[in-house]
Amino acid sequence: MTLFLVPTPIGNLQDMTYRAVQVLTEVDYILAEDTRNSIHLLKHYNINTPLKSYHDFNKEKIEDSIISDLTAGLNVGLISDAGMPLISDPGYELVRRCRMESISVTPLPGANAALTALIGSGLPSFQFMFLGFIPKKKNEKFEVIKSALESDKTSIFYESPYRIKSTIELIAELEEDRDISIGRELTKKFEQIEHGLSSDLLKKMNDGEIKEKGEFVLIISPGDTNASTEYDMSIEDHVNLIIDQEGIKPKKAIKEVARLRDMKASEVYDIYHQV
């Protein structure tokens, strides 16, 4: 009949909504990524609804049976271990299948770590991108972070406590004066949200002021939107603009334009001097 997408607390059990408790009590069964974790939440609210595992390793096998149950008139709830279902968690394929087969889907509002960290960060929130977990491989991580630093939108990531320091080191290496924010242990007793320059937050981590414990939300402020405007002009005009703005010689301005445009300095030199 209906697939209910039910958010759960990201740390503080008091953040569970009345509606979420009611829905989970009334559905015929609940799909959970890790039933061992979810059973504690259900017990806390005296919810006795049966639990079934639904995760990346079995979702394709059980999707047909879930669809059959919904078609037969059952109501099913889908939860994640913490926060909003489907956000960096399995489930979108099931929702898409329901939509394709005209099965009702009802999403409930609720807790979400990315948005909680964003509104507490002090960084621009009108336009933002959520990009999930940062890749583990160094090359992939470099490309993702570089892209975020060049974006004109606020970028939000999830990061492991075991890799957060190396990620901040990379950001500081690429751009030490970029505004960033780190949120950890959100809604819990030892919640910490820090905002500052990448180099300053790296120092706080090195000094032990930011503990490398708990899941992290990393937020990177938008890049310089004027840069994209500069790229709309010719290379000659771009070099001259840098000369006027920074009061430097053409040779240094050429190197700066080459860096900004990801070009070889010799290429910019040839174009500027019309060689």
Image (tube, rainbow, N blue to C red):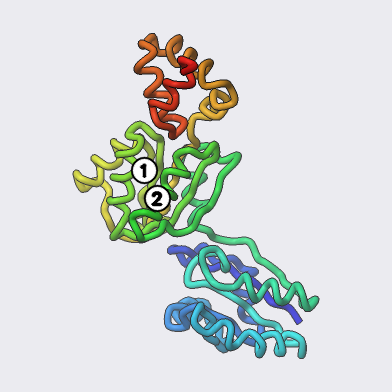
Which image quarter: residue 254? top left
Q: Is residue 43 visible?
A: no
Residue at 47 percent across and 49 percent down: it is 117
Between 149 and 116, the one lying in front of the other is: 149
The three-letter code of the residue at mark 1 reads Glu
Q: Do the residues labelled 1 and 2 touch (CB within 8 Å)?
A: yes
Identify the disc placed on residue 183. Answer: 2
Q: What residue does disc 1 label?
A: 194
* Depicted 267 relative to depicted 134: above or below: above
- Which of the two discs, 1 and 2, labels the residue nearer the N terminus? 2
* Depicted 237 relative to depicted 267: above or below: above
Identify the disc placed on residue 171. Answer: none
Residue that lies at the very extreme toward the right in this rendered image: 102
Residue 173 point in image, percent of width and height: 30, 39
The three-letter code of the residue at mark 2 reads Gly
Between 38 and 150, the one lying in front of the other is: 150
Residue at 80 percent across and 76 percent down: it is 102
**Disc 1 on helix, strand or loop?**
strand
Q: Can residue 157 be seen in this view?
A: yes
Residue 31 point in image, percent of width and height: 57, 81
Compared across the picture, whether 24 is left or right of 121 comes to right
Compared across the picture, whether 234 is left or right of 260 comes to right
Between 193 and 246, the one lying in front of the other is: 246
CA–CA distance in space, label 1 to label 2: 6 Å
Residue 266 point in image, percent of width and height: 39, 26
Quarter of the image for the N terminus: give it: bottom right
